[in-house]
Amino acid sequence: MPIRQLSDTIINQIAAGEVVERPASVVKELVENALDAGARHVEIATAGGGLSLIRVADDGSGMAAEELPLALSRHCTSKLGDAIDDIRSLGFRGEALPSIASVARLSLRSRPAGADAAAEIVAEAGTVGPVRPVAANRGTAVEVRDLFHATPARLKFMKSTRAEAAAITEVVKRIAVAFPDVRFTLSGSDRTTLDLPATGGDAARRIAQVMGAEFADNAIAISAEREGVRLSGRVSIPSYSRGNALLQYAYVNGRPVRDRLVAGALRGAYADALPADRHAVAALFLELDPALVDVNVHPAKADVRFRDPGLVRGLIVGAIREALARQGLRASTQAAAAAFGAFRPGGGRPAGTAPGWTPERSPQRPLEPVEAAAATGFAEAAQAELAGTPAPSADARAGTAAPDAAALAQRLGAARAQVHENYIVAQTADSLVIVDQHAAHERLVYEALKAALDARPLAAQMLLIPEIVDLPEEDVERLCAHGAALARCGLEIEAFGPGAVCVRGTPALLGEVDAQRLVRDLADEIADSDTAGGLRARLDRVAATMACHGSVRAGRRLKPEEMNALLRQMEATPGSGTCNHGRPTYVELKLADIERLFGRR
């Protein structure tokens, strides 16, 4: 077949394959156009999951009648000057509207400020009609009907109406987080109305609107800046997490992105605070010179490339870890809610059992000293009540002084008892605290080991016979560039010709190690993210294992002074709200909630 020039319609349909992946992609492009036009209220309506109808109307600056044909022509835009590295708008490629018009029925109606009337232009399957006057308010309204009717094969790849509608909701929410001064309204026959009122620029309120009040109650603010890159936002405390990463929102200069580097930095920041199958909740905002980030990576504009990825990753990891350390001990409200749910009638019965189900009694076992004292105290109090005489005090029964006011005023309060040889029950001025002694002490030992690792360079186990690892020249250069950092972790390497490195020592803490595999893995990591954190991560995992085996075991009886010492250590140790595996170390139940549980409030 001879070479020939493709028609404009075919060219636009090819471009639509990248820009218009699904109805949510159309909504994203149209909403971004509205925001670039300075809109303060964006209304979105859909039907049939967006396949039947998508309508986006705004109160932005609008377009003159003579600009409408250009708006439906490829590579025509008002947002980009002569510098492709100075992009300060969400859109800039000039592909969205013509791409959409090539695969759907599209009408574009607009009225700029000061104009006497609005104008409209209609396109169907790439064929553009004439401009005609219409009546409309200031701003722009774009209506897309029968999406992909011109390319019916694409319809086979769409999901259910409900799934497509949910994807549109997610897109609107992600965009809305970055624009708290704009009102967003999403409605239609295939959904309940979502209304996100403007918050006057209050980012925290908008985040709570979109991500939920529960996240706001379990999040901490972050703010940091390094070499012209500014980071702000909110991240969840370690004890509040999700089973997937859907609630991780990232923005670069106001643009919603799904970036591997940002996602990897989040995993790194929570590496020793969350289990591998749990994910932090976060809204991160990066601001930097447009020349330092490339947003022209893909037509969908969801991917970006940073000029200095190591700087960005280090900023995110450092800021989150510092914020987690600074906020101190804090329990998730999620854990407390789950605990109260278990206390309510039926809350703890197995799935599928009848409402009247009650658990079988467990075999009787001897009460521990603290438990026996408590049981005796209740009996004595009941007898005194019947006899009309004062009940003996707790001090008289236990023979010890009651916790003083200073201990009760501490974050975790004063230890009252140990139950089931693993759980410390403590009392504060306004709450009840239950601590998992093994999980808590495991975190304390782990943090102490990490502090020792950070205090000085790690010892290297020198190899009797140095090991030569063959690598591509570029990997050798990358490894040698990070040689000093690797040496602090106990890995001694040096270049051995243009295509190999010589390993003279490995971290003693790792014991016997496959040097070939270790070096190759590090080379791959440095090539991917320009960091050599993988080695330190392996060392941290060893420290975590040592901490697990060296901590107070479940089943050990603790004296009152030991329990209180553990509580005080937890209060002074960053990250002690979760163990090394990401499980909570304590649950706090507010007295007011307990009283409501028993009908006292």
Image: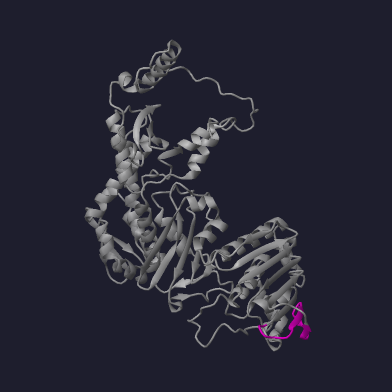
Question: Residue 549, relative to residue 249: is it above or below?
Answer: above
Q: Position of residue 516 (x, y in %)?
A: 34, 57
In the drawing, does residue 35 fall left or right of residue 388? Answer: right
489 or 42: nearer the viewer: 42
Task: Place residue 350 in its image quadrant.
Answer: top right
| Stretch of the chain drawn in magenta | 112-133
Is residue 40 something that shows in the picture?
yes
Q: Position of residue 4 (x, y in %)?
A: 69, 86
Q: Position of residue 477 (x, y in %)?
A: 32, 70
Q: Residue furthest front?
A: 388
560 or 71: nearer the viewer: 560
In the drawing, does residue 43 fall left or right of residue 591? Answer: right
Task: Place residue 356 in its image quadrant.
Answer: top right
Colouring style: one colour
Is residue 546 something that shows in the picture?
no
Task: Place residue 184 in its image quadrant.
Answer: bottom right
59 or 142: nearer the viewer: 59
Would residue 229 be counted in the magenta stretch?
no
Question: Residue 146, relative to residue 444: is it above or below?
Answer: below
Question: Residue 403, relative to residue 457: is it above or below?
Answer: above
Would residue 116 be counted in the magenta stretch?
yes
Question: Residue 557, relative to residue 386: is it above or below?
Answer: below
Residue pictured at 30% horizontal, 29% vertical: 560
Q: Position of residue 353 (x, y in %)?
A: 64, 29
